[in-house]
Image (tube, helix red, strand yellow):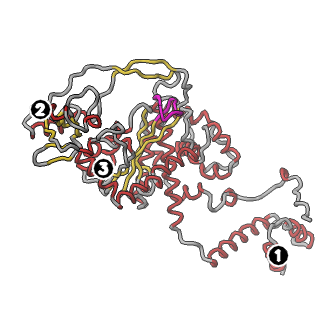
Amino acid sequence: MQAMSYQINNPKDEFIMSTMEELVPEDHLVRKIIKYVKFDFIRALTKPYYSDLGRPGYDPVILFKIAILKSLFGIPSIRRTCEEIKVNIAYRYFLGIPFSESTPDHSTYSKAYTTRFYKTDVYEKVFENIIEQVIKAKLLDTTYVFMDSTHVKASANKRQYVSTYVEAEKSIFEAEMLTYINEIREENDEKPLPPTKDNHKEKKKKESKTDKDSGWLSKGEKEHTFAYNAHTVCDHHGFILKQMTKPSNVHDSQMFTPLFEHITERYESIEAIGLDAGYKTGPIIKRIADEQILPLLPYKRTNAKKGTFGNSGFIYDEEENSYTCPNYEILYYQKTTRQGYKEYHSDEDTCKSCPLKKSCLSAKATYKVLRVSIYKPYFEFAEEIKNSPYGKEKYALRKETIERDFGDFKERHGGRYTHYRGLKKVSDHISLAFSCMNMKKMALRLSEFEPKKSTISYLNELCSKISHYFNKKIAVFDDQPYTEVSKLAFFNSLKNEPLSVIRSFFICLIFSYGNYNHS
């Protein structure tokens, strides 16, 4: 039979003498972040937004640390974070606020954000500074980088919207494509194509009544909501190098150029970049290859109808610049279109009597028009890398890097949805969350490199703590004569110590101390 558990009487009335340093566990995350991450730069960063006049306010480092605690531990709101700080010793330790002082109210941070930081790039600069600290710690490895996006649900009802018409945006690659198309046309003695005129085409768009900056997300059959997309690049170890927040109706490929330009200008050691199928377009692969970087891309299904010949069924003759069909007839080059395709036509009379006509032509077509992308060599280059052992090994790192970052962001750092409204506020929230993820990863990795304590150093530290604790205990009796009664009172105060060894150690010390003082 198991004995009844030990009952503690009146724990609310217990009086302890201890310091915050002793109460926070040695391996707590906030200790590691305080040790390895520097926050002093925030004062210089925010100084232009504070006045030298008036009564002093809260240290901006403390205000930013409150927001950092929120993202670091996935607390839903600033209000809840400030409530937790009042009772959580580790949070107070991180902020440097003793129990004798009051903690900032949630409105203090909110007011500071709206009046000082909202219209600035402070949060982006905080993110960049943390990256600089990671670089100085020599933890960054940009040999392989990975780019992707994840959605964050907006604080908006998906049923409260209006349908509007907006001007359709041009492709970000249009000018680049036209230059490449005209180069090919000149090689084939064709006239260059002029730039397209602004026709001001319109497209239908759902606009939220609550958060007009958010975009309509249609992901699969079930996911239909207003959201934002965090377009992100990370390194080989999962450190986030750059993020840009946009509405979810902006396609991933539209954000490739600004992200790619940022990482190639800042980091020179990039060997390969891993992307998902949303980035598998000709201009993107060409841009990557032109920078002497290897594209790591997945398989993407072709648009060929079942039971018909796709482009793979036609054999290219480089010398004649022509294609041979499955029935061994020749298709000759005709032109390069504005859409970025080379067109090859067959002979109409030949196709009429072809036995493979039903598998090759549509019902209304009388001859075959083969359209081949001008970026075909680049697609073949990417396909060759994909099928190589190198490509398979490196592309598999996506699930350990960018995909894991997104998983942590959603599960541990409040990234599934946002309470903020407006692109700027959501972008600041995501930037700070990614900053927290970087500083957490940096602190944990650096703590792994610390040499383990030897047994002797551990015992020395233990003895030092025991001595410190003992000195506090006997300080109460310093002004009293050392009688047998005072010794007995002190001995009884030690009965609640958890370890009998420490209690015995104290008993020996008190009697030797008393004998020494009264000898």
Residue 220 part of the magenta-drawn span: yes
Mark 3 / mark 2, whichever is N-terminal: 2
Image quarter hosting the C terminus: bottom right
* Chain part drawn in magenta: 214-228
Residue type indicated by callout 2? Pro
- Which of 400/222 is in front? 222
Residue 397 position (above or below residue 244)? below
Where is residue 81? Give x, y as percent: 63, 41
At label 1, the amino acid type is Ser
- x, y percentage for residue 26? 64, 62
Q: Which residue is mark 1?
A: 504
Question: Which residue in the protein does label 3 denote?
Answer: 264
SS under mark 2: loop
Circle 2 sits on which residue? 192
Q: Earlier in the sequence, mark 1 or mark 2?
A: 2
Give the class, few, some or many, for how many residues have Cα within 10 Å of label 1's Cα (few <14, many ≥20).
few
Tell me the quarter of the image containing the N terminus. Answer: bottom right
Tell which residue pokes out farthest to the bottom in this image.
519
Labels 1 and 2 touching (C-beta < 8 A): no
